[in-house]
Structure formats: structure tokens, C-alpha cells
Amino acid sequence: MGASASRCRAARVPAPEPEPERALDLSQMPPELLLVVLSHVPPRTLLGRCRQVCRGWRDLVDSQALWLLILARDHSATGRALLQLARSCQSPSRNARPCPLGRFCARRPIGRNLIHNPCGQEGLRKWMVQHGGDGWVVEENRTTVPGAPSQTCFVTSFSWCRKKQVLDLEEEGLWPELLDSGRIEICVSDWWGARHDSGCMYRLLVQLLDADQTVLDKFSAVPDPIPRWNNNVCLHVTHVFSNIKMGVRFVSFEHWGQDTEFWAGHYGARLTNSSVMVQVRPP
């Protein structure tokens, strides 16, 4: 009874205030170390944001060293081939600003379909069109097209319908020394078919153009018409430009279609999954 009934509570000692974190000042890093750090940043961010930070960062982003370091990180067979190609096809002035490898890494044009909206998934966007008969429409495929980004197609009418894209290869991320190196090839592909109850006709013209859009090479296809009662057949046209002449800067891709019955509406050729790809030539 006596020992004091009061219980002493230990005094609470306030925790020390955490020291404010000091921001990492990347500008104080040696340039060679900053180059390694920046090489882990996505290419589009490097070009769109990092390049605007200061003159020192802009110089690093514009340098070939940064982009070669980014390419060297891909150890696949394709990555090694691209690195070797980039090193051997550098601009005559190694101090050219900005380095063309930046756009190359951001756009990744090798092995990518350069045709925009190849299946009509965006309507007629990006195509220059000429409407014949009742004009172009977009419908679902009647036959599955392998590898297509969308199972839709452009459908033609009872008079020739035409559409075209002209691809600027430099805008897509390639540069003149690479295009003139003799180390790349341009692969073109197109799918066309018919609906079961109507025959159709089709034409394709692909042209390689110089900076003045003079034709340097071309490929054309005028296959036999597909007859009526064809089980919704779908055909594949391909071509590879393997010995590309110096000076190619644009690719013109143009195709036509119509039906053979001359019916009002949309019973003509069905075009889809058009493709233009730049590949590294095998050794």
C-alpha cells in the first residue's frame, strides 16, 4: 500500500526531424558519367525534354556517343547488326548537330511497317484517295489476314478507286548515309481479295524516289482478275528492292481496285495490311 501507486511514465523523446534530402545535381557529374545516366532515358524523352535542360545536356543529346551507347545495349543479333550499321554509316561530319541517330532510335524504322493506317482502322486517314463509283468504304475482313494489326479492309466500287501514300524515309528516322550504304533493302507487301459473289480487279505500283521525287526504281503488279464465286479468296503480293540505287529518299505506294460486275455499292477489290519495311540486308 504504500509503494507509490503512481506509475512513472517514461518521458517521450521526440524523434529528430529528418534532414531534407538533397536533390541530386546531375550537372555536377562528369560528362562521361552523365552520358551513361542519360543512355537509360527513353529516346523520345531525351529529344523532347532532356535536350532543353541546358547547353551541356543538349550537346550530349546531340552527340553520336550517346546514341551509339544506347544501340550497344541491345545484344540481340539484330541489335548488333544495327550497331555495326550505325557505326559504318555515320555522317561525314562527326560533329553534325543534331545527330541523326537520335531520330533513328526514337522512330525505330528498321523492321517497322512505315505505312500508316494499313487496314483502314482509322478510316481513310493518311491516305490520298480518289473515289471511283460509290467510293471507298471500310469493312470487316471476310477472310482472316495473318499478322494484320486489324481485321478490317478498304473496299472499292464499280469504277477504279485509287489511294496512295508517299513515305519520307528521312522523316521516318533513316538518314542519307544509311540509305545510300547498299546495306539495306525495302520490302513491300499488300493483300487483296474479293467477296464470294463478285469478281474484282487490282493494281499495285511502288516507286522509289529521290529528293526531287524523280523515279529511281519501281515495281508494279497487275494480276489476273479474281472471278465471281471465289470463296472469299485473299491474295498476297510481295516484292523486295534489294539493290537500292543511291539517292532514294521517298517511297510512293499506290494501289487501285474495282469490281468486275459494275454493280452499284461496294463489291470491288478488298485491300488491306499494306506494308513497306526497311530491313538490314543479310551479309
Image (cartoon, helix red, strand yellow):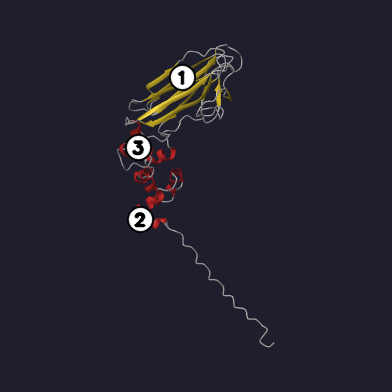
Relative to 21, residue 115 above or below: above
In the image, residue 273 lies at what x, y percent? Answer: 50, 26
For badge 2, the amino acid type reads: Pro
CA neighbours of label 3 inside 10 A, class few (<14), some (14 to 19), many (20+): some
- Based on the displayed image, in which of its 4 quarters is residue 28 positioned? bottom left
Q: Quadrant of the N terminus?
A: bottom right
Q: Nearer the viewer, mark 2 or mark 3?
A: 3
Question: What residue is shown with label 3?
Answer: 81
Residue 56 seen from this side: no
Whole-number angstrom distance, CA of label 3 to CA of label 1: 32 Å
Question: What residue is shown with label 1?
Answer: 204
Whole-number angstrom distance, CA of label 2 to CA of label 1: 55 Å
Question: Could you say which is closer to the camera, residue 253 or residue 237?
Answer: 237
Q: Say the numbered circle drawn on residue 30.
A: 2
Relative to 260, residue 90 above or below: below
For badge 1, the amino acid type reads: Leu
Among the two numbered marks 3 and 1 on one chain, the one whose residue lies closer to the N terminus: 3
In the image, residue 117 lies at what x, y percent? Answer: 52, 29
Among the two numbered marks 2 and 1 on one chain, the one whose residue lies closer to the N terminus: 2
- Label 3 element class: helix
- Label 1 element class: strand
Q: Say the numbered circle drawn on residue 172.
A: none
Relative to 252, residue 85 above or below: below
Q: Would residue 84 be found to the left or right of residue 107 on screen?
A: left
Whole-number angstrom distance, CA of label 2 to CA of label 3: 30 Å
Residue 277 seen from this side: yes
Residue at point 44% right, 20% down?
Answer: 205
Total residue callouts: 3
Question: Residue reaching furthest bottom?
Answer: 2
Question: Could you say which is closer to the camera, residue 193 or residue 88?
Answer: 193
Query: Contact, CB < 8 Å: mark 2 with mark 1?
Result: no
- Based on the displayed image, in which of its 4 quarters is residue 176 positioned? top left
